[in-house]
């Protein structure tokens, strides 16, 4: 028994140090804000609707797949098409304590098969989804190179997938929304599993979004075989900035306490600044285009075990001068989770004490 106990305590030590290190980065720039914090999450919830287990460790094993695709607007001569990346299905493990989650995942070859017919995608996909009691925030850093054209048979006479190893997408940005009914509605329940929403409830959302993106290639965005059918045939680079307010609604339906389905959608109408660079002339356009940010989670929640499937998807649009349609960058993450909550032992609680102090207001007693 000494061996497993020793490893368990060492793991808690490591997780404690990681959380403390991450938190200290934020604390250095927000010390004043922390001095003003005088409440704990448990005081912000209606326990008849939401049970919080943020002082337990929620562990998980999961499968996930991230992606960032690009929709090219069509014309009177041709329908729209999409550039898709060849990303991997990843197997991961993770844990959540208080407001922080640490997840590690790796694309295992046996899960992905032979995807060489779709080409090779090199990518760094950074997604941070922060589910606070009153605020939900999403941050994206998408750096992709190498795409294939979809649908497969879009180019007449071309066999197999049309591969564009030179296609690149770079996009950074995010969204922050206030949760009005924060005492009874929980994003955490379905998406990071350290809470349990036991009764149905919904909430309105209000916030803002900001994105900056660059789409480019070594030649033109439109394949040579299709250039006669698209007005933006000579465009080789697209740059855009989106910034503006948004509104939304989220709802969790709970059946017999344990079964749940969560759906959330926000719509923003940001001011959009777009520049299309071509071999003929560069064109700039300013307008208002819609962005969508949706979440769906379904599963089974209980005191210890949680089984869930979820998807988070963002659609960021930009309207150029050459076409009446919209360029749409769609970023998402599909996940299947098996999670379990662990109550800390006295020794484990002592180990995590420094982390607890980082989250508590001055003078608040941690039991």
Image (tube, grey):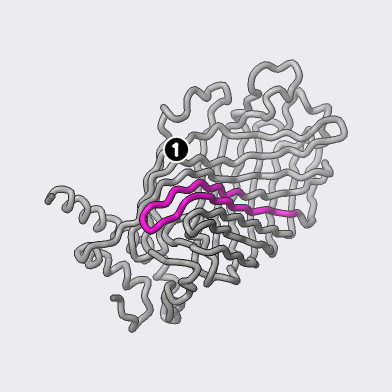
Which residue is located at x 79 percent, y 50 percent? 284
Q: Quadrant of the C terminus?
A: bottom left
Residue furthest left in the image: 2
Side of 213 where 367 appears, left or right: left
Residue 142's place in the image compared with 356, above or below, is above
Residue 78 falls within the magenta-colored stretch = no
Residue furthest right in the image: 76
Classify mark 1: residues with Cα within 10 Å, few (<14), some (14-19) or many (20+).
some
**Residue 214 or residue 200, whichever sits in front:** 200
Q: How many labels were placed on the picture?
A: 1
Residue 141's place in the image compared with 99, above or below, is above
Which residue is located at x 80 percent, y 51 percent? 285
Side of 98 where 11 appears, left or right: left
Q: Which residues are magenta?
A: 290-313
**Which residue is disc 1 drawn over?**
90
**Residue 178 or residue 308, whichever sits in front:** 308
């Amino acid at each position: 028994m000494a061996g497993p106990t020793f490893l368990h305590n060492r793991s808690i030590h490591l997780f404690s140090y990681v959380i403390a290190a991450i938190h200290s980065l934020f604390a250095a720039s927000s010390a004043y804000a922390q001095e003003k914090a005088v409440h704990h999450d448990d005081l912000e919830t209606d326990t008849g609707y939401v049970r919080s287990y943020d002082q337990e460790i929620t562990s998980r094993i999961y499968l996930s797949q991230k992606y960032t695709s690009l929709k090219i607007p069509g014309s009177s001569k041709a329908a729209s098409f999409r550039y898709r990346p060849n990303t991997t299905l990843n197997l991961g493990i993770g844990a959540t304590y208080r407001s922080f989650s640490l997840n590690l995942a790796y694309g295992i070859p046996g899960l992905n098969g032979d995807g060489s017919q779709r080409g090779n995608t090199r990518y760094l996909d950074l997604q941070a989804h922060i589910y606070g009691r009153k605020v939900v925030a999403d941050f994206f850093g998408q750096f992709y190179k190498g795409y294939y054209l979809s649908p497969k048979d879009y180019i007449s006479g071309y066999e197999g997938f049309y591969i564009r190893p030179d296609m690149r997408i770079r996009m950074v940005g995010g969204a922050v929304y206030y949760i009005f009914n924060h005492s009874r509605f929980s994003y955490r329940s379905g998406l990071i599993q350290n809470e349990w929403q036991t009764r149905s409830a919904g909430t309105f959302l209000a916030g803002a979004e900001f994105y900056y993106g660059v789409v480019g290639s070594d030649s033109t965005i439109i394949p040579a075989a299709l250039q006669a059918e698209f007005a933006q045939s000579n465009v080789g680079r697209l740059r855009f900035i989106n910034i503006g307010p948004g509104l939304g609604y989220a709802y969790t339906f709970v059946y017999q306490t344990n079964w749940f389905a969560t759906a959330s959608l926000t719509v923003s109408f940001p001011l959009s600044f777009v520049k299309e660079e071509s071999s003929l002339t560069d064109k700039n356009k300013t307008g208002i285009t819609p962005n969508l940010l949706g979440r769906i989670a379904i599963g089974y929640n209980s005191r210890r075990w949680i089984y869930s499937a979820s998807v988070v998807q963002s659609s960021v649009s930009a309207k150029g001068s050459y076409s009446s349609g919209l360029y749409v960058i769609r970023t998402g993450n599909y996940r299947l989770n098996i999670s379990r909550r662990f109550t800390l032992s006295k020794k484990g609680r002592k180990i995590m004490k420094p982390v607890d102090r980082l989250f508590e207001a001055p003078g608040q007693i941690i039991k």
